[in-house]
Image (spheres, rainbow, N blue to C red):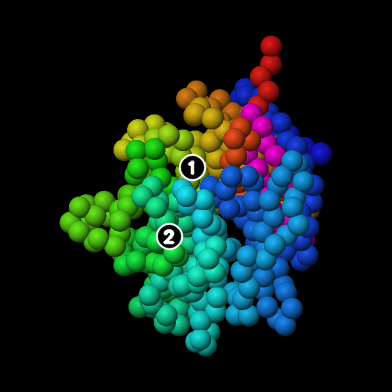
């Protein structure tokens, strides 16, 4: 595999990770590949056109270095397929998978919702509202007490996409999903968010659920917010309300009239919490990928670090490689097309590896988002390249003598 090495703004002292190219996944005109969180082996899902104008959610598992034949996990004749808002899947602590698909609602215009499917063929809507607006960008995580916790962006009460600053009302919502795939009572976490930036959600070791998303102030500043999600949103008691205080640990001051379609990514290791994001800065002309880390479970955060060094487009992801290092990925513009870049950073010392290219892509919306998945001592990356799913296995950096 050809790797691209570009010097970092600061001195890079960490060794590069090992990158192994994996075999091609048996897919046809794939869309929106993603990993199944919590799976016992690296497991990919993606959308693929089936017969009679249907769309299939396919799945394949990496076993002994080979991808298993794809299997249909769900079918839809009314699927909403989008480059930025894509299916999610998470395995509960008892080993049951929950899938979240996007389907058009029975309304004119840009209206869709999130349909849940469990292994027992049960299908339910994630949200109670079925009005003609957007409900999407879900994040799912296994709940410590069984089932799952879910968040999503919800446009109820607004005029929907394309209706101007006032009409595009979007809220961050949360609910708990039971083992049979049924969502419980909903809770509004933030009543004003960016309209089409992805969300992320994770539990720290102490049982605290954290979410990150792009906020939206009254004067259109769209910085990344962090909020503690009640582990049982359906209770809606006073103790739950105490946690509903979103804050912005790092204020970039990025003011932009429309949604940049560039959400943050969150990772946890024990009670350590890290998230990364794309911003253009307060002046709106400094594209950069930034990373910030909390060593005390989200109470305080260290000084944010700039990770990217050349023409970043964003579309970030990250995972902890171990308790001291994180891997961050993002898309960067090149003279021709774009490249998915990666960098390792030691969160204790601030040392970084040189950045490296995991693969090149045409440089369009259809490239979608590269997704990461941690399994044992490796991190797996998957992305779309003109309808073909590419994937690699990334190992801990080799240390020199």
Position in image of residue 170 (x %, y %): 40, 69
Q: Which residue does the image show at 54% across and 69% down from the upper left?
A: 121
Position in image of residue 169 (x %, y %): 39, 72
Q: Is residue 378 above or below residue 143?
A: above
Residue at the extreme right? 1
Task: Identify the image quadrant of residue 400.
Answer: top right
Q: Is residue 356 above or below residue 157?
A: above
Query: Magenta stretch containing residue 397, yes or no?
Result: no
**Image disc number at residue 179:** 2
Label 2 Cα neighbours within 10 Å, binned few <14 / some 14-19 / many ≥20: some
Label 1 Cα neighbours within 10 Å, binned few <14 / some 14-19 / many ≥20: many
Residue at the extreme top? 401
Number of the front mark, 1 or 2? 2
Q: Which residue does the image show at 45% across and 65% down from the upper left?
A: 181
Q: Which residue does the image show at 66% across and 19% down from the upper left?
A: 399
Query: Magenta stretch containing residue 387, yes or no?
Result: yes
Q: Which residues are magenta?
A: 379-396
Q: Which residue does the image show at 81% across and 39% down from the upper left?
A: 1
- Whether residue 53 appears in this view of the structure is yes
Measure how far apart labels 1 and 2 are at the Cα level. Answer: 24 Å
Q: Is residue 293 above or below residue 159?
A: above
- Whether residue 219 appears in this view of the structure is no
Residue hosting label 1: 267
């Amino acid at each position: 595999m050809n790797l691209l090495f570009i010097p970092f703004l600061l001195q890079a002292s960490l060794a590069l990770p090992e990158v192994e190219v994996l075999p091609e996944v048996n897919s046809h005109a794939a869309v929106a590949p993603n990993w199944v969180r919590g799976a016992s082996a690296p497991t990919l899902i993606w959308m693929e056109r089936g017969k009679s104008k249907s769309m299939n959610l396919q799945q394949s598992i990496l076993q002994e270095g080979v991808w298993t034949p794809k299997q249909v996990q769900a079918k839809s004749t009314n699927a909403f397929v989008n480059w930025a808002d894509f299916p999610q899947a998470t395995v509960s602590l008892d080993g049951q998978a929950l899938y979240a698909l996007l389907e058009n609602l029975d309304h004119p215009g840009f209206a869709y919702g999130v349909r849940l499917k469990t292994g027992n063929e049960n299908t339910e809507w994630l949200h109670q509202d079925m009005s003609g607006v957007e409900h999407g960008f879900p994040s799912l995580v296994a709940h410590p007490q069984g089932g799952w916790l879910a968040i999503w962006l919800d446009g109820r009460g607004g005029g929907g996409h394309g209706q101007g600053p006032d009409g595009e009302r979007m809220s961050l919502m949360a609910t708990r999903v039971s083992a049979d795939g049924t969502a419980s009572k909903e809770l509004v976490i933030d009543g004003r968010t960016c309209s089409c930036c992805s969300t992320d959600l994770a539990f720290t070791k102490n049982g605290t659920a954290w979410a990150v998303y792009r906020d939206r102030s009254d004067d259109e500043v769209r910085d990344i917010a962090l909020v503690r999600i009640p582990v049982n949103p359906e209770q809606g008691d006073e103790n739950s309300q105490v946690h509903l205080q979103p804050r912005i640990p790092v204020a970039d001051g990025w003011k932009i009239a429309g949604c940049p379609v560039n959400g943050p990514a969150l990772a946890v290791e024990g009670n350590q919490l890290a998230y990364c994001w794309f911003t253009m800065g307060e002046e709106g002309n400094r594209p950069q990928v930034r990373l910030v880390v909390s060593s005390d479970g989200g109470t305080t955060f260290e000084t944010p670090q700039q990770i990217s060094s050349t023409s970043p487009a964003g579309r970030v992801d990250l995972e902890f490689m171990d308790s001291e290092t994180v891997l961050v990925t993002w898309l960067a513009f090149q003279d021709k097309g774009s490249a998915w870049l990666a960098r390792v950073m030691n969160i204790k010392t601030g040392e970084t590896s040189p950045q490296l290219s995991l693969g090149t892509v045409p440089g369009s919306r259809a490239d979608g988002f590269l997704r990461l998945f941690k399994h044992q001592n490796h991190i797996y990356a998957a992305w779309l390249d003109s309808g073909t799913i590419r994937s690699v296995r990334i190992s801990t950096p080799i240390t020199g003598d």
